[in-house]
Image (tube, rainbow, N blue to C red):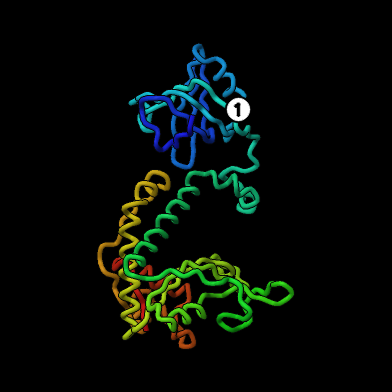
Amino acid sequence: MKRTEIGKVKAGGKVNIRGFIEKIRDQKSIQFIVLRDATGKVQVTVFKPEKPEVAAVFETLMLESVVSITGTVVAAPNVKLGGIEVIPDSVEVLSSAKVSPIDEKSAPDLQMDYRWLDLRDPKKHAWFKVQTLVQKAMKDYFVEKGFTELFTPKLTDASSEGGADVFEVKYFGKKAYLTQSPQLYKQMAMAAGFEKYFEFCACYRAEKSFTSRHATEFVALDVEIAYVDNHHDVMDLEEDMLMYVLAQTEKTCAPIMKDVLGIEFKAQKVKFPRVKLLDAYDLLEKEKGYKVPRASKGDLDQKQKDCFVKSQKKNGTAILYS
């Protein structure tokens, strides 16, 4: 029988479901199993006197074992997982789990050593789903606005932005470098008359860093537009795109964020306030008592930006400009 994703299981008829065993509650005459795949969870109920051979299999399995279950889906209003349960006819063990070397309290380094196990956590898995839908919203916006998507090279024979902060690699007996950005290629695209271009690009910068905002390897949304009159053209595009993406995120991700992550997400419905950099300095001094050093003026470091954002929470998100 062809597999049915758990998120698509409905009462009535037979199904074959496959996934990880998340919970087992073994009682005298009945077993309750929660089975999980990438689309959701479902309760499997085994009546031991009726299916002793199925019950015997579950008695030998540890949590996170992978099984294939064929059975009948019935309505069960008292069951919290969708008001349904699966009554199994048979079970096949696809992968028998051993004692997990990590749990939610394990040190980050140990969790990263067993990342494939760590990512089985539904909360961590959910962030990847949210990321997928947010990126889709970004792409949909630019495609609808007539932008062209490019896929630029990530290996070059020279630094794309100058400087020494590049990763050197061997390339068929020659030197090559991982690209710092698609800067050179997007300028070529403008010269070619593309006018509106975007790319989700991997960027690499050999910068030593001890913060969570390191730039060694990251994915950027890179956008270029032609015939710009002033910086407000760029800010208008950024604002319009962000408003669209936030609205789509609320529509597609709000249920996941609430049910799995415990986050109540609401999209911003008002325009972003625009604050001149000089005015930001004044606000920091008046509202937070922080005076930006003269040597630091011309920009805000991360500490100053965080301080400014806290002072502006009552006004929502703000876009800074010079």
Residue sticking out furthest to the top = 49
Residue 6 in percent (x, y) is at: 44, 35
Circle 1 — which element? loop
Residue 243 in percent (x, y) is at: 31, 65
Task: Report whether 298 appears left or right of 255.
Answer: right
Give the residue at x 60% y 49%: 115
Classify 59 as above or below 128: above
Residue sticking out furthest to the bottom = 294
Residue 92 in percent (x, y) is at: 57, 27
Mark 1: few, some, or many residues within 10 Å (few <14, many ≥20)?
A: some
Residue 64 in percent (x, y) is at: 57, 35
Residue 160: quarter of image: bottom right
Residue 77: quarter of image: top left
The residue at which mark 1 appears reads as 61
Give, as a three-letter code, the residue at label 1.
Leu
Image quadrant occupied by the C terminus? bottom left
Residue sticking out furthest to the right = 173
Residue sticking out furthest to the front = 192
Q: How many marks?
A: 1
Q: Nearer the viewer, residue 288 or 315?
A: 315
